[in-house]
Image (tube, rainbow, N blue to C red):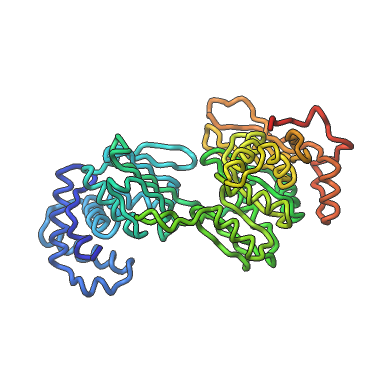
Amino acid sequence: MSLRARIAAPEEGGAGREDGHLVAVYRAKLLEEIDLAEMSSLAAAERRVRLERVLGHIISREGPVLSTTERSQLIRRVVDEALGLGVLEPLLADASITEIMVNGPDSIFVERAGRVEQLPLRFASNEQLMQTIERIVSTVNRRVDESNPMVDARLPTGERVNVIIPPLALTGPTLTIRRFPRAYTLPELIGLGSLDEQMLMLLAAFVRARFNVIVSGGTGSGKTTLLNALSGLVPSHERIITIEDSAELQLQQEHVIRLESRPPNVEGKGQITIRDLVRNSLRMRPDRIIVGEVRGGETLDMLQAMSTGHDGSLATVHSNSAEDALMRLQTLGSMSEVQIPFEALKDQINSAVDVVVQLTRHADGSRKVTEIALLVSHGREQFRIVPVTRFVPRPTGPDRVVHGHFEHLPLPRSVAEKLYVANEPLPPAFGVAEAIDVLNTRQAIG
């Protein structure tokens, strides 16, 4: 969209018709005053500063009489709607907000610190919200209309955007913007209470000893955050290939190849799936493969890669327990077009997966590693897992904050020996079981 079109777009303000009229009036005055050719040559930050300065002169010259706060708000709103996303602009500038959810023009929610809250903001109309949505999707060369009512895309700035509009969305155009937090290190996650020092030492030993790790959890439980932190433990000289639907991982190693899937274009062609990328990655001489989330037939390719020379790989899966994670891997693996008996998938999983790290998002918004479990079954036998760490919560008090402690359990001797061979020390809090403790081993029906 041209600069003139963006400034002249007939949008209303977000607080009501009267405010919307005022914003529209001053946007028109701003358009009359500025030199569009000069503005187009400026960087985005300089363009905003110039518009704010010109608009400030217009308001000083022509009124209305406003307090300092009102004046600043009017200038910000006019410039936001001219160059940015109007009502959403201050929300995107707020680093504490991790998710923005627009459920029609009259309902805007955000997530802060794991808690969802409604804001006293609104779009003036469905039309204004649709114009904002169109502006967003146009930045990634996509369109949204009745023939293409759903869009899922990643913005150039990194946010993941999902749009669904009527007639599919009955409450009006619906927009979800997920902002990815900065990459946390494992020590920082200790500070947040997600795990403790002994667990960090154990996970570090697993990654360095090339155990295959599955990070499991529900929506918003912090799977990607933990996966990113764990990936920082991979030695810097190794060749790492990351595969994601939307590029979220922020690896710091030097030898990293980042792959991202591609949705079909408006003609329904050109789609590149996660499975396509997993298959291609095997031809790229990877030392480790990291898959942001397995959710379909690519699971079988990932499992085969893990069990045939690509030890030390990591992936996430959406599930609510360690047992559920294994069952979900089996189900997802069966979605491949390769005709493989369901029972044979047990062999693939038992051979490929070493560790399941289960994350949970609690009622107070905190995210914790609630279990680290080892898969000790073999061949086509029923899945057997041995928990070596679990979070034991205390009854919730008046503050509604989740408190508790991490409990550490002995490791199976076979696992301890594998760490020993890899020259990885066993953390002091974990002993070594002489044999697998039947009482401490859980079975998952597979």
Work out which quarter of the rendered image holds the C terminus and state it. top right
The correct choice, above or below, for 437 with respect to 15 in the image is above
Q: Is residue 368 visible?
A: no
Residue 141 placed where, x, y %? 34, 60
In this rendering, position of residue 427 left or right of residue 68:
right
Work out which quarter of the rendered image holds the N terminus and state it. bottom left
In the picture as drawn, the residue positioned furthest to the front comes out as 339
Closest to the observer: 186 or 360? 360
Closest to the observer: 374 or 362? 374
Closest to the observer: 228 or 137? 137
Residue 420 placed where, x, y %? 85, 52
Residue 329 placed where, x, y %? 63, 41
In the picture as drawn, the residue positioned furthest to the right comes out as 434
- The residue depicted at 70 percent of the width and 35 percent of the height is 390
Residue 48 placed where, x, y %? 28, 64
The correct choice, above or below, for 9 with respect to 255 in the image is above
In this rendering, position of residue 398 left or right of residue 385:
left
Q: How many marks?
A: 0
In this rendering, position of residue 282 left or right of residue 173:
right
The answer to which image quadrant residue 40 occupies is bottom left
In this rendering, position of residue 314 left or right of residue 400:
right
In the picture as drawn, the residue positioned furthest to the left comes out as 62
